[in-house]
Image (cartoon, grey):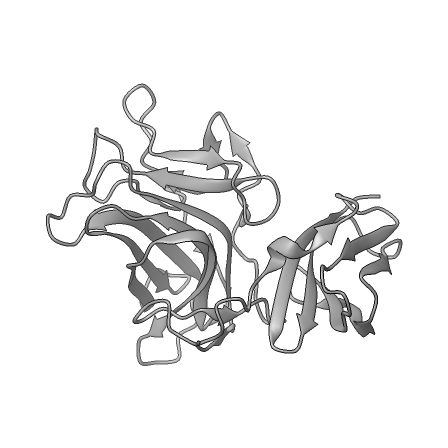
Amino acid sequence: MKKPLLLILFSISIHSLFAQYVFPNFSFENWTAGEVDGWNTNNAAGVTVPVTQSTDAHSGNFAVKGEVTNFNTWTAPNFGSDGCCLFEINQEYATLNFYYKFNKLNNDVIVVTAQLNTAHGWPVGFVNARITDNASTYTPIAIPITYLPGDSVPGEMGILIGIQDTVLNTATPGSYFIFDDFSLGWFTALEVEENIFAEENVKMFSSPATDFISFSVPEKNPSNTVSVVDITGKQVVKSFTSKTARTDIPATDLSDGIYFLNIRNGENLRVKKIVVLH
């Protein structure tokens, strides 16, 4: 049965080749003294720390968790672009994309706002959306970006995300979100089967990969179309068909770095983030 996850947000066909990982530390792997590198939080050491590192990651080792604390229940936690500077971009993108979990209490929602400016600071676009439903497993989201009339090119983007109660305007302590893998791009927005994204049943045999990217799928008689793309969306291993449970892809010609393994079987697309390190 097909159904929308949200009224204005859409589940997505994951990781088309047009997704761009332009945000610094987009997968939240790097942290310094309890703060996520490249992003801004409303943590106040010794008072309240609503934004923390989580090992419940969609990919890699870490994600970012934001939880409402007793200290501040007004759109807390606040998480987004670094306070000293906005994220640099250089073109229009159709959607803001990420993966999330949401432990929703009472009438709490996740509020997602963003503003896109020219390199000189003039507004050219914005995001204003709410995530309203509980999500106990990682859920992919593509939020449409609305652009103002004109042909100005965006040069920077600010993001602010928090939790708010829609009735009382104060969030409930214990509500929390977990985010991972932020990107901008042209994901295909559509209603899809709930099991369209199922990376959890892909078993990796080497992490990080060295000579081979080796994985298996649980199907007894698999017939998968497999490809590998880098973080810019460029296909670095051309699509091929694998009809065996275990597949080995030579990785000796790949540079060290982060890649995405795409495994398609009919309408089911599974995506696995992998690291190559020789």
Residue 105 visible in the shown view = yes
Percent across and percent down for residue 183 are: 51, 59
Residue furthest out toward the bottom: 150
Residue at the spot x=76%, y=43% of the render?
208
Q: Residue at left 53%, top 33%?
A: 31
Q: Position of residue 185 (x, y in %)?
A: 51, 69
Q: In which quadrant of the rendered image does the C terminus lie?
A: top right
Residues 181 and 185: in front is 181
Nearest the viewer among 183 and 106 is 106
Give the residue at the far top of this rendering: 46
Q: Position of residue 99 (x, y in %)?
A: 47, 56
**Residue 167 or residue 257, whichever sits in front:** 167
Residue 179 vs 55, above or below: the answer is below
Residue 34 location in percent, x, y? 46, 28
Task: Determine whether, in the image, residue 102 is placed left or right of residue 59.
Answer: left
Above or below for 19 versus 200? below
Pick whichever, 28 or 91, lies toward us. Answer: 28
Left or right of 277? Residue 172 is left
**45 in relation to 175, above or below:** above
Relative horizontal placement of residue 138, taking residue 221 as reference (left or right):
left
Can residue 38 be seen at all in this image of the molecule?
A: no
Classify 18 as above or below 257.
below
Residue at left offset 61%, top offset 72%: 268
Furthest residue toward front: 220
Quadrant of the image for the N terminus? bottom left
Image-based side of 59 in relation to 33, left or right: right
Total labels: the figure holds: 0
